Image (cartoon, rainbow, N blue to C red):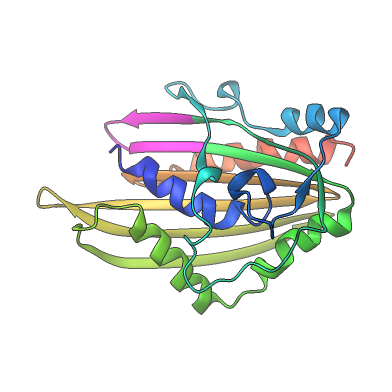
């Protein structure tokens, strides 16, 4: 399932690039001016191996932000360079290979902006896109992460938005099946954004083979939410 990590890179670059100047280095991205205290705080928000069930291994630093600016077909990023990030950090990639659930990878990115208004603005353009445009964007990114000759079918996208007190949650759940050696393999991908105050945390999770474990997703979501509620942001 080595190609699964490529799907992660393509999709994460598509969305996370909107919130991270360090991601793709586009002149349109928010500007990063690091503040040591904010960098230290942002690091405490990231998922670590200790937050995940037994069996996950540390696969090293997440490099999903090193993708192309052109991954997201049909979507043009507005000029966000006047927004200022005072911290932008990423976790390591954590991977699990299991006979029942297949290959799973999880990572997070935490960003602290100069103000809550700027954190909101960094994602507002993307969350306001119609589902039809997101469908085209994500499907193209998904297919770009698979072998060119791979047959695919059944792409789906579900968008969920929730507000819990002053925490704003956006979830993009997608998946398809691709053919490998005559067998159809399901791939599921979730990107979730958690925004509270001037903090924005992104969760990326992918599974190939058995589906993302809902208990895992609930556990990591609760961990991220709890940390954000306790953080001074």
Q: Quadrant of the C terminus?
A: top right
Q: Residue at x 80, y 26 (%)?
A: 40
Q: 126 or 223: nearer the eye? A: 126
Q: Is residue 39 depicted above or below 15 in this figure?
A: above
Q: Residue at x 61, y 53 (%)?
A: 17
Q: Quadrant of the N terminus?
A: top left
**Residue 84 screen position, x and y as percent:** 83, 50
Left or right side of 227 for 15: left
Instruction: Please state the extent of the stretch shown in magenta in the rendering.
Output: 94-106
Was residue 96 drawn as part of the magenta stretch in this picture?
yes
**Residue 19 screen position, x and y as percent:** 68, 52
Q: Residue furthest front?
A: 27
Left or right side of 49 for 186: left
Q: 49 or 222: nearer the eye? A: 49
Q: Specify the principal SS of the magenta part.
A: strand
**Residue 36 screen position, x and y as percent:** 85, 28
Was residue 158 drawn as part of the magenta stretch in this picture?
no
């Amino acid at each position: 399932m080595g190609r699964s990590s490529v799907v992660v890179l393509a999709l994460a670059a598509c969305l996370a690039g909107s919130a991270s100047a360090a991601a793709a280095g586009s002149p349109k991205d928010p500007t990063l001016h690091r503040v040591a205290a904010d960098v230290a705080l942002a690091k405490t928000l990231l998922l670590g191996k200790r937050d995940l069930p037994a069996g996950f291994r540390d696969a090293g630093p997440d490099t999903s932000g090193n993708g192309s600016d052109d991954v997201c077909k049909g979507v043009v990023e507005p000029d966000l360079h006047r927004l200022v990030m005072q911290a932008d950090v990423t976790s390591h990639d954590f991977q699990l290979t299991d006979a029942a659930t297949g290959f799973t990878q999880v990572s997070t990115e935490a960003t602290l902006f100069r103000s809550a208004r700027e954190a909101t603005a960094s994602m507002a353009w993307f969350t306001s896109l119609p589902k039809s445009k997101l469908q085209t964007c994500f499907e193209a990114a998904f297919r770009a992460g698979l072998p060119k000759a791979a047959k695919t079918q059944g792409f789906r996208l579900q968008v969920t938005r929730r507000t819990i007190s002053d925490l704003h949650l956006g979830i993009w759940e997608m998946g398809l099946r691709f053919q490998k050696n005559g067998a159809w393999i399901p791939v599921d991908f979730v990107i979730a954004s958690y925004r509270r105050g001037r903090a924005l945390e992104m969760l990326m999770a992918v599974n190939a083979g058995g589906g993302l474990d809902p208990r895992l997703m609930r556990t990591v979501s609760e961990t991220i939410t709890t940390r954000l509620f306790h953080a001074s942001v």
